[in-house]
Amino acid sequence: MPASNSSSDPAPSTDPTAAPPLRHVRGSRAYRRVNLALFAAGCSTFAMLYATQTLLPELSDGFHLSPATASLSVSVTTGALALAVIPVSMLSERWGRSRVMTISVFSAALLGVLAAFAPDFGTLVVLRTVQGVALAGLPATAMAYLAEEVDGPSLGSAMGLYVAGNSIGGMGGRLVTGLASDLGGWRVALVAVGLLALGSAVAFRVLLPPSRNFTPSAMTARQLTGVLRSHLADPVLRRLYLLGMVFMAAFGTVYNYLGYRLLAEPFGLPQTVVGAIFVIYLAGTFSSAASGRLVGRLGHRATLWAAAAITAAGALLTLPDNLALVVVGLIVLTAGFFAGHSAASSAVGLRVTEGRAQASALYLAAYYLGASVGGPVGGVAFHGRGWAGAVLLVLVLMAAAGAVAHGLSGRMTGAPAPAPIRRHPRAHVRSTA
């Protein structure tokens, strides 16, 4: 099936005699282009989101900051994304998925390069905040684009590749910043990530086929508020959102302050090696898949309990000043975190029957707010008690996760459906700029 290089979002024909729009099928050229485009965009988005995480010790030294203050360069970005993901998802209903994603990846990449030239930490924080808003366009929109444009039996593999791009980008961004900062400092590291992201944005724009099945939505702000209220009124969804927040707060605490510990004695590792530690993220790829199988056997509550226990056990393994144990502990903790995140996020989709996009956006908002809260709070724990303080915080958070998961027994389906969102076709939608 031929596909144009344009990534505009034309409305489908309103002619009742017209053939139904075609969706991209696995194995087709257009399907491969969709996968490559969103893989590139996912890699660049999540590389930029956590670009300063590996650089926190260097930012502390360069600007004379405490670990908690330096972590704001990560927390403001994830927090801004969390707050922006719902309104941006609403914009994509009106403007089109391709348009919002294109604006997102290009503006975030340019802001990433600009951040490297920040004259002081305050300016860096402002730029990273705006970048977080820009980055919200991809996670708020990509899955909706895939659901609309990819054939049902082919959708699972397309979603899987997109999520893989997210995790590889999160890992690769840290590897690049670790290597580049060793060569030229944190500014060179941010320029390197920004330029790579800009190249990925160009590849995304060229590769993404035009939308064939997008219909502009007539949803108003009042309707959106009604859907969000309906989801937040459901006690099971509230627990799932809280679980995403708590798991991410624990995970962010460990990886935000890991560099401080490994750069200092008795380890004294170079920045490049510290960045390479993030290869451990690959453990999450396997545990996410295993989590799905575990849910099928044990149910969501037991799986979430297991994930919390594994995450806590991994944190405890990192306590001794032994590099091998620290690495093993990080692998265990990472596997536990991704299993918990996978179980909680999949339960959201099972729980709701209407307004799934908004339910997922609320989960993402809570998830990234967890990263924003966990950063500063974890910094206070680390600054006050060292690594033992950070581990203690993780243990408290995982105990809370177990308690929250307890209320999920037997109530995973049957949420009250919000009022359906009225949609109407339009004869014309402007092409993507």
Image (tube, rainbow, N blue to C red):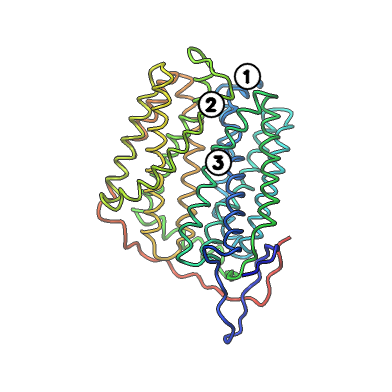
Residue 44, position in %: x, y?
62, 44
Circle 1: element type? helix
Quarter residue 209 falls in: bottom right
**Which sits in the foreground, 315 or 221?**
315
Q: Residue furthest top?
A: 266
Residue at image mark 3:
78
Q: Determine the CA span between mark 2 and mark 3.
A: 15 Å
Q: Is residue 212 above or below residue 74?
A: below
> Quick one: quadrant of the C terminus?
bottom right
Circle 3: element type? helix
Residue type, numbered disc 1: Asp
Residue 185, position in %: x, y?
68, 24
Mark sitting earlier along the chain (1/2) = 1
Classify mark 2: residues with Cα within 10 Å, few (<14), some (14-19) or many (20+).
many
Residue 309, position in %: x, y?
31, 35
Q: Is residue 34 above or below residue 130?
A: below
Residue 197, position in %: x, y?
66, 43
Quarter residue 110 falls in: top right
Mark sitting earlier along the chain (3/1) = 1
Residue at image mark 1:
61
Residue type, numbered disc 2: Ala
Image depth: mark 1 or mark 2 in front:
1
- CB under 8 Å between callouts 2 and 3? no
Q: Determine the CA span between mark 1 and mark 2.
A: 13 Å
Classify mark 3: residues with Cα within 10 Å, few (<14), some (14-19) or many (20+).
many
Mark sitting earlier along the chain (2/3) = 2
Quarter residue 330 falls in: top left
Classify mark 1: residues with Cα within 10 Å, few (<14), some (14-19) or many (20+).
few
Residue at image mark 2:
68
Q: Residue furthest bottom?
A: 17
